[in-house]
Image (cartoon, rainbow, N blue to C red):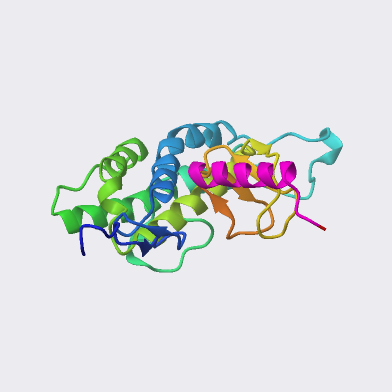
């Protein structure tokens, strides 16, 4: 490469956008880090939602069952309970993989490839371990799978806990569908994204360029 050429651009393994960083662009690296940073609070909120919501009165209870109702939600217990061996050996498991199972599998992979000592199997220790190696992880060939699993885990925890992310409607139109559907979602790592076009996800710089371009188009309308 000559001194007059810019950095080599390669497609990001996660979003496909051009980047001069190894394997992943900066917005995707920030998203992966954001997923990990948000896990402790999400898990705490999910644990607080472990009690079923009581609806109706005594007449709503099923009288035909001979067993006492379970006082806690099974979906929460399954998510936040210990991981079965099947999770780590790749065998089939019913329902979502427990949080510890997901994090342990990735932490074990990091430990194996970096030849570092594995970490204890607690959510806090595993999350911090992965955070400590997130920049390294974002340069690995498996980063797209890692990012996808963290995003899926985040969505499951939000759904189970009943917490919906804050979404702000933005004053621009989508550059693909041309609809007023651009939002900023808290914790997503993107400055803007379209609700209907999965490929439209903008970094802060790209969103700033879109705002400028659309503002100029309004102030300088084209000729008829």
Tell me residue 102's x, y (percent).
39, 53
**Quadrant of the rendered image containing residue 159:** top right
**Quadrant of the rendered image containing residue 84:** bottom left
Q: Is residue 142 visible?
A: yes
* Quadrant the N terminus occupies: bottom left
Residue at (57% x, 37% y) in the render: 186
Question: Does the segment drawn in magenta span residue 211?
Answer: yes
Tell me if 139 is positioned left or right of 116 in this view: right
* Quadrant the C terminus occupies: bottom right
Tell me if 185 is positioned left or right of 114 in this view: right
Tell me if 60 is positioned left or right of 76 in this view: right
Tell me residue 83's x, y (percent).
39, 51
- Viewer-proximal residue, 167 or 146? 167
Question: Does the segment drawn in magenta span residue 192?
Answer: no
Q: Specify the farthest residue to the right.
A: 59
- Viewer-proximal residue, 59 or 198? 198
Tell me residue 218's x, y (percent).
74, 44
Tell me if 210 is positioned left or right of 138 in this view: right
Seen in the picture, residue 128 relative to 23 is either above or below; the reply is above
Residue at (34% x, 35% y) in the render: 124
- Magenta stretch in the rendered image: 204-223
Tell me residue 157's x, y (percent).
54, 44
Q: Is residue 70 visible?
A: no
The chief SS type of the magenta part is helix
Residue at (30% x, 61% y) in the render: 8
Q: Specify the farthest residue to the front.
A: 223
């Amino acid at each position: 490469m000559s001194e007059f050429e810019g950095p080599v651009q390669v497609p990001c393994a996660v979003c496909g956008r051009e980047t001069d960083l190894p394997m992943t662009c900066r917005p995707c690296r920030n998203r992966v880090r954001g997923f990990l940073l948000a896990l402790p609070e999400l898990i705490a909120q999910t644990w607080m939602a472990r009690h079923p919501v009581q609806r109706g009165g005594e007449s709503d209870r099923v009288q035909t069952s001979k067993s006492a109702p379970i006082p806690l939600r099974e979906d929460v217990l399954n998510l936040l309970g210990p991981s079965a061996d099947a999770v780590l050996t790749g065998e089939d498991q019913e329902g979502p993989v427990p949080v510890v199972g997901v994090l342990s599998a990735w932490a074990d992979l990091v430990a194996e490839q970096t030849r570092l000592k594995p970490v204890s199997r607690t959510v806090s220790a595993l999350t911090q371990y992965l955070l400590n190696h997130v920049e390294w992880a974002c340069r690995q060939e498996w980063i797209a799978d890692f990012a996808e699993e963290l995003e899926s885990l985040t969505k499951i925890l939000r759904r189970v806990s009943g917490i919906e992310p804050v979404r702000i409607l933005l004053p621009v139109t989508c550059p693909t569908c041309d609809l007023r559907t651009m939002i900023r979602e808290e914790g997503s790592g993107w400055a803007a994204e379209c609700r209907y076009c999965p490929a439209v996800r903008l970094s802060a710089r790209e969103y700033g360029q879109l705002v400028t371009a659309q503002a100029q188009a309004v102030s300088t309308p084209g000729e008829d």
